[in-house]
Amino acid sequence: MIHSVLVANRGEIARRVLRTCRELGIATVAVHSDADAEAPHVREADAAVRLPGNAPADTYLRGDLLVAAARAAGADAVHPGYGFLSENAGFARAVQEAGLVWIGPPPNAIEAMASKTRAKKLMAEAQVPLLAPLDADEVTEADLPVLVKAAAGGGGRGMRVVRERAALAGEIEAARAEAASAFGDGEVFVEPYVEDGRHVEVQVLADAHGTVWTLGTRDCSLQRRHQKVVEEAPAPGLDDALRATLADAARAAARAVDYRGAGTVEFLVSASGRPFFLEMNTRLQVEHPVTECVFGLDLVAQQIQVAEGAALPADGPPPPRGHAVEARLYAEDPAHDWQPQTGTLWRLDVPGDVRVDSGVADGSEIGVHYDPMLAKVIACAPTRSAAVRKLARALEQAHVHGPVTNRDLLVRSLRHPDFAAAGMDTGFYTRHLAELTTPAAADAADAACALLAAALAQAVRDEPGRPRVAARTGGWRNLASAPHLRRYTDRDGTEHEVRYVWGRDGRPAPVSPPDVRVVTARADAVVLESGGVRRRYPVAVYGDRVFAGAHAFIALPRLPEPENVTEPGSLLAAMPGTVVRLAEGLREGATVTAGQPLLWLEAMKMEHRVAAPAAGRVTALHVSEGQQVDVGTLLAVVAE
């Protein structure tokens, strides 16, 4: 029996494992970096051990420190969660050699699937359908497009879609560099890229007694940068024959490596319905909640019981019921190349009958060291359409006060006709991102009302003692009805002005637009009527940040500050991060072409390329490899 579990992870998955352990009566131990000292998962565990430093390489990726922490705290088992060392065979062995229970698959199974190239050979022997790798030197125009992919790791890192033969060598080199930086292994391979394919996976659960369950399918086709955004179970639109093929292939894959515990076998399904093995994730998946909802199981509890030696019922899992959809809420800006965002998350509240798995709490600081996911929101219902509608509405009504997020994109994605018709594939955002990030006319009208609500609520808050009626004093006249001005910028940096007057009824009223009437105005909410329709806009203020309804603004000072002037051609950091590498030969005086990559910034587990804005000469280079930079840091200057 397991009595105390050290969770070798952080954030959402750490809290998820802690929750199940509490329900099972198991004591818990958290670990934390210095950046996570006040994180929710630390507060919720029975004990916590500090891992000195902030960077993952110094903390959550230090297997020796994690094993030492488990011993120091008296834990008798380790759960790795997902990411970090969850698929590291060496760490699994170190845990077992320390006399601790490893809540995961056997190290040999992890090792067998750790390299995608070795895994493909193993799956071919097990007769699992797959895409055959291509020799990079022999790729022809007829083979295009192709996918360059890291042999180790995942999460979309070290992956490049290549559509031009001349670009292949450069993309292979870039993928190698990114893979080496992310996983310590620069091996990559090339395979055919399946256009308009669907990403479908099968959850497996196996015990030490020869029983292997397959728990239906999940569709994870909505992805950005090869990372999942929306997942659902079961995968819609598959016929029974294809579902049976996928289940049989997943079962064969698990048996081929003598698998135990929870794992996922991932497939790419072509538009014609042909499945191809992608990889096996030898851990719990981020999207496991949709399977839990459909099958009524706690997969973390199942992992623990299998690790204790329990046998799965030989007659199989419970029957699936209904449908579940999960959306990942990220601190990122989809309209600007998915740039990760940082800052204080003042409030996160998702209403409705939905499940919210989150690693943050009100007041959490979203930093640069870790993945930008704030929460997973999961809706379950008897039918797919009901689950999708419930999830979209919950996200729409959510209060997300903090950095820019992908919340609006998620709502629009779930309500897109292609998604509603189950016509999505991995190219969904390639085709639809522009329309999904462009506000409709109704959105613009709502934003205008939200801006007005923000100004009126702040007027009530800041001017509670203002005279409401004209008064005479010593021959001077105090005009309470004179227009007042407040200025704001939205998240795109566009400046807006709101003019209002104080009415004799003691309420502020807008000067324009004339068709909007103020019903009530309080410091925390404003009700407006437009076109005969009343709407309520909750308002929250945090310093100069104002949130009204689903919109956010920055209040500008009455007397604006002088603008900072930057030299033409200046390249500024769009996010805080680390300069992971410079282009070969980049130096002051170097000649560059328009669009040429100059350097790469790493932030929140993703690399972002900074390119030359125009052809010209590098007149200044202010950064070097390994340097930490903040938002707005001057990186380089390119003179046309």
Image: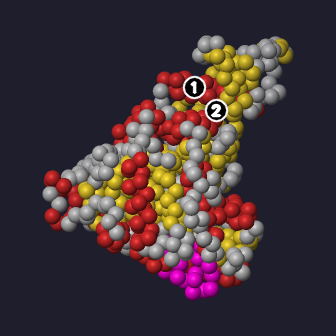
Marks 2 and 1: in contact by CB < 8 Å?
A: yes
217 is higher (above) or lower (below) than 80: above
Residue at image location 68% in from the left, 44% down from the top: 349
In the image, 232 versus 297, the foreground residue is 297
533 is higher (above) or lower (below) than 9: above
Q: Which residue is mark 2?
A: 549
SS at circle 2: loop
Residue 401: horizontal and vertical position, in percent? 64, 43
User: Which of disc 2 and disc 1 is earlier in sequence?
Assistant: 1
Residue 437 falls in image quadrant: top left
Residue 467: mark in rendering: none
Residue 42: horizontal and vertical position, in percent? 70, 65
- Answer whether residue 3 is visible to the viewer in this image: yes
Q: Which segment did they paint magenta?
A: 85-104
Residue at image location 62% in from the left, 38% down from the top: 394
Coloring applied to the structure: secondary structure
Q: Which residue is mark 1?
A: 446
In the image, 349 versus 460, the foreground residue is 349
Q: Amino acid at mark 2?
A: Gly
Q: Amino acid at mark 1?
A: Asp
Please indicate whether residue 346 sits to the left or right of residue 404 in the image: right
**Quadrant, the N terminus:** bottom right
347 is higher (above) or lower (below) than 256: above
Dot 1: within a 10 Å radius of its alpha carbon, few (fewer than 14), some, or many (20 or more) residues? some
Instruction: Based on the picture, tell me whether residue 188 belongs to the magenta stretch.
Output: no
In the image, 443 versus 53, the foreground residue is 443
Residue 293: horizontal and vertical position, in percent? 60, 50
Please indicate whether residue 529 sits to the left or right of residue 149 in the image: right
